[in-house]
Image (cartoon, rainbow, N blue to C red):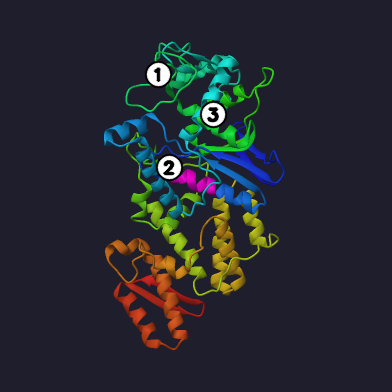
């Protein structure tokens, strides 16, 4: 059975869906005011992997990933650019979709925009006020009263006293408590606004705070209680903590909170020089920038070769290594009529793969199975093994291209021996050996000799042995 590490429980737990055979999964998506960076790519790829494995396991998955298209940063950027918020956000939604598709991410079932659900947010805020969990300030803002929700802090594992001592919070004279957070912001000049019943100097006009949107949208699609809520580790506090407070209070019955989510999942940070990658720190790399240098499947492979909860350390060296590793897998498939097949899960390697994925989506161990299969293909030339390798890889969104198409992609400049080519050397030599063997088999000895000479001129010596061809540097 599948086990998932539940952030709320702080342990791996067997997964049991609320409705047999069906999974409801909500993931916090992107705030669309700029191009997505590798931190966003990790969220996209990780939860794409999760949804793929759930479907492979026989579940009908309803996967919702929201889009934040109203936010302080969005308003500021649109005003700076002299464009409407709609023009800005749609441009970056389109860019996000392009980046996501290149990374092999299957579109979620639904991708709701925050601005499409403001009415639902207003209704939820009104319910929170009615039940005594929120209050309207005289300036038109509405705040959530954290003191009135008994379970506040259970996701982060901190008490309110700890949070007050350790968190820097914005000082606002309209709050009853420094830890209270905003649900509704009164309208300001040059900002979009919606009518509300909350009063204030602007007649109730304003816009929602950030946290309320996910509570309203998840409730719209899944109701009061659903299976999985995911997102980046940075959202655990305060965003997801606040979601729990809002949703469980709004859906409370007879004063008792209604559990919002059964399993909370958080992927680890992408780090650069041991610091979290983020726009605020200025150490981020956009997906588009990285894809100028690396094939998109290499980036996907790089993300999945680490366990989703562990930190992911970004560097060119790590991506170069991922490129060589993926090249070895594709080289194993080259020349074989591998096809996607119905998996016999009793097969020892398939069983290993399943055990790994059922253990909290342990992709590093699942990838070890792929490399063992690749080694077996290289030894036995078995089409059946090659097909199993291709099919298991496909579950992770890998190895679905024609091997030659991958090996000749724009970021693999074969036939050139410049110094910049050195990071591709191992994969290139492996391919040239395969080509030379094919030429010899076809009795095209002139072509085989030419390949040997070109490699020798580049300082690579081939040695034919009874076990096959090996190589070394001169």
Q: Position of residue 142 (x, y in %)?
A: 47, 17
Disc marking residue 170: 1
Q: State how far apart marks 1 and 3 are (Cα).
A: 27 Å
Secondary structure under badge 3?
Answer: helix
For residue 190, above or below residue 407: above
Q: Secondary structure at mark 1?
A: loop
Q: Position of residue 182 (x, y in %)?
A: 46, 21
Residue 120 circle label: 3
User: Please, which residue is most extreme toward the bottom here?
Assistant: 443
- Camera-nearest residue between 118 and 214: 118
* Disc 2 target residue: 39
Q: Main secondary structure of the magenta part?
A: helix
Q: How crowded is the residue under tag 1: few (<14 C-alpha within 10 Å), some, or many (20+)?
A: few
For the record, the magenta segment spans: 40-48
> Residue at coordinates 32% horizontally, 31% vertically from top-left?
76
Regarding residue 307, the answer to whether it shows in the image is: no
Q: Tell me where residue 221 sits by quadrant.
A: top right
């Amino acid at each position: 059975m599948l086990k998932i590490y539940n952030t709320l429980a702080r342990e791996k737990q067997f997964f049991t869906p609320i409705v047999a055979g069906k999974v409801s999964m909500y993931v916090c998506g992107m705030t669309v005011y700029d191009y997505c960076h590798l931190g966003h790519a990790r969220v996209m790829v990780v939860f794409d992997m999760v949804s793929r494995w759930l479907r492979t396991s026989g579940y009908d998955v309803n996967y919702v990933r929201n889009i934040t298209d109203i936010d302080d940063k969005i308003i500021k950027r649109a005003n700076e650019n002299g464009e409407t918020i709609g023009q800005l956000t749609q441009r970056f939604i389109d860019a996000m979709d392009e980046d996501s598709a290149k990374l092999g991410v299957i579109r979620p079932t639904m991708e709701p925009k925050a601005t499409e659900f403001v009415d639902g947010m207003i209704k939820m805020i009104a319910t929170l006020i009615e039940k005594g969990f929120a209050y309207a300030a005289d300036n038109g803002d509405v705040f959530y009263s954290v003191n009135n929700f008994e379970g506040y802090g259970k996701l982060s594992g901190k008490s309110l006293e700890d949070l007050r001592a350790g968190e820097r919070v914005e000082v606002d004279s309209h709050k009853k408590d420094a830890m209270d957070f905003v649900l509704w912001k009164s309208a300001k000049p040059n900002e979009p606004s919606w009518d509300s019943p909350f009063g204030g100097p602007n007649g109730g006009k304003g816009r929602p705070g950030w946290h309320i949107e996910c509570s309203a949208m998840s409730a719209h699609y899944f109701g009061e209680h659903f299976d999985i809520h995911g997102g980046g580790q940075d959202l655990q506090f305060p965003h997801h903590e606040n979601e729990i407070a809002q949703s469980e209070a709004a859906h409370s019955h007879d004063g008792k909170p209604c559990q919002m989510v059964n399993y909370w999942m958080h992927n680890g940070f992408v780090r650069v020089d041991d610091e979290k990658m983020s726009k605020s720190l200025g150490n981020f790399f956009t997906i588009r920038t990285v894809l100028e240098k690396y094939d998109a499947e290499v980036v996907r492979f790089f993300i999945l070769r680490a366990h989703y909860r562990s930190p992911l350390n970004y560097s060119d060296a790590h991506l170069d290594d991922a490129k060589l590793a993926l090249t070895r897998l594709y080289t194993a498939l080259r020349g074989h009529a591998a096809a996607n097949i119905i998996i016999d899960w009793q097969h020892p390697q398939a069983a290993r793969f399943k055990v790994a994925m059922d253990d909290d989506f342990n992709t590093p161990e699942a990838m070890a199975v792929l490399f063992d299969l690749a080694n077996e293909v290289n030894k036995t030339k078995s089409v059946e093994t090659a097909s199993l390798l291709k099919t298991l890889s496909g579950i992770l969104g890998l190895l679905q291209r024609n091997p030659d198409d991958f090996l000749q992609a724009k970021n693999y400049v074969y036939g050139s021996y410049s110094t910049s080519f050195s990071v591709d050397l191992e994969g290139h030599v492996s391919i040239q050996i395969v080509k030379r063997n094919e030429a010899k088999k076809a009795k095209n000895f002139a072509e085989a000799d030419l390949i040997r000479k070109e490699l020798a001129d580049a300082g690579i010596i081939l040695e034919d042995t009874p076990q096959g061809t090996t190589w070394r540097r001169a």
